[in-house]
Amino acid sequence: MSKYKHIQKEAYEANMQLPKLGLVMFTFGNVSAADRDLGVFAIKPSGVPYEKLTAGKMIIVDFEGKTVKGKIRPSSDTKTHALLYKSCPSIGEISRFSELHTLIIIRWIFPVRPPWMTK
């Protein structure tokens, strides 16, 4: 069993939500999921239709943007994801999706609730 299987599964499941929610057209858009202990993230391969994706096709990349595992070219957004993961230690997942415009949503993972979320 691959030590990256958990983040490949997480990235795959999140990527599959994009077309279900109508957030992407064609193969545009992706989600990545990081494992900070391993210093890597899983990201959608470039140009692969969503209906042909599997968890095993998610590409493993380090925080420098270098492919660690995978035979397909990673998303063209890989370097941006790598820079964000490297620069912001609390980021655990990044989504980018397109439909007439591009949005980046970063899900921050806080060890405790941030002050603005408390009553």
Image (cartoon, grey):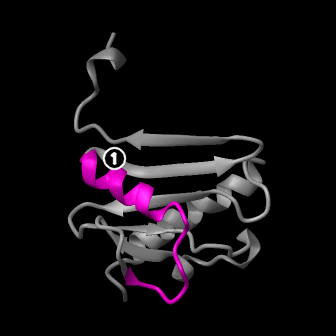
Residue depicted at 72% across the width and 69% down the height: 50
Vertical position of residue 114 compared to residue 29: above or below: above
Which residue is the site of mark 1?
91
Is 45 displayed left or right of 84 in the figure? right
Q: Horizontal and vertical percent for residue 12?
A: 56, 67
Residue 108 lies in what quarter of the image?
A: top left
Q: Position of residue 84 (x, y in %)?
A: 35, 50
Q: Nearer the viewer, residue 78 or 92?
A: 78
Is residue 32 found left or right of 46 in the rendered image? left
* Residue 17 location (% of width, % of height): 66, 55
At mark 1, the secondary structure is strand
- In the rendered view, tell whether residue 78 sits above or below residue 115: below
Magenta segment, which residues? Answer: 68-89
Tell me which amino acid carries mark 1.
Answer: Ile
Question: In the image, 47: left or right of 35?
Answer: right
- What residue is rendered at 53% in x and 82% in y? 56
